Image: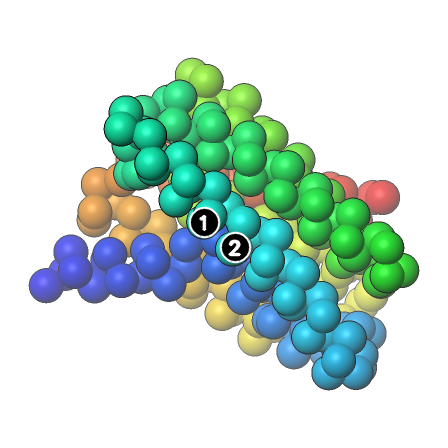
Amino acid sequence: MLKKKAQIISVLFHPVLIPTLGFLLMFNSGFYFSYLSWEAKRYVLMVVLFTTGILPLLSVALLALKPKFDISLSKVNDRLMVLLFTSAFYYLGFVLLNRIKAYPVFKLILIASVLVVIALLLVSFKWKISSHMAALGGITGALLALAFRTGINPVYSVLVLILAAGLTGTSRLIVQKNSLPQVVAGYFLGMTIVYLVIYFV
């Protein structure tokens, strides 16, 4: 029963869903872009969902047509291929948001996410690291950087993210997809890269 719950949590906070959920959270965290019209928010969410969720899933589905491809991504080569495609799709999201002159912070979040995926790609040559936790760490880093830059304290949003990270990290350990060092490293890798890009750029 515990393992089943852990699997459900892993799916709910999967890397293909976390960027969209993260933007939804930030839209309701009291930042200046919270006052955007619903039409503008919807467009941003559609771009984010399409480029960070739907396209990566489609790429995995297409790769799965190859007999030797392991959809669980336990093989290094399979994992590297998916991360390579994902980084390209994230960059596409950056380009699409750039074309509509969206708030600079939205584009920064996506370009920072590209850097996180590239970092995961490089690390994956030698070591498996948790992409679930890197995604959650990235959203946490974005929220903290925005908080320090704007002086707004989104305490409830931060608590939600910490709870989500705790649940997800524990779930990854229960289903034995990652070790504790991989979970911790993934989280801090994502958080550090995104925080530094948004706070200093």
Identify whether 153 is placed above or below 76.
Answer: below
Residue 144 vs residue 176, the one in the foreground:
176
Q: Are marks 2 and 1 in contact (CB under 8 Å)?
A: yes
Residue at 15 percent across and 56 percent down: it is 3
Query: What is the CA distance from the residue labelled 2 to the residue labelled 1?
Result: 6 Å
Quickly name the residue at label 1. Answer: 57
Which residue appears farthest toward the right when viewing the image?
A: 101
Which residue appears farthest toward the top when viewing the image?
A: 126
Classify 10 Å Cα crowding around label 2: few (below 14), some (14-19), many (20 and above).
many
In the image, which disc is placed on residue 101?
none
Quickly name the residue at label 2. Answer: 53
Q: Quadrant of residue 184?
A: top left
Q: Amino acid at mark 2?
A: Gly
The x, y position of residue 63, in whole percent, is: 40, 35
Identify whether 74 is placed above or below 39.
Answer: above
* In this picture, residue 72 sits left or right of residue 156: left
The C terminus - image quarter: top right
Q: Amino acid at mark 1?
A: Leu
Identify whether 161 is placed above or below 40.
Answer: above
- Residue 116, can we see it? no
Residue at 34 percent across and 37 percent down: it is 64
The x, y position of residue 9, in whole percent, is: 31, 61
The N terminus - image quarter: bottom left
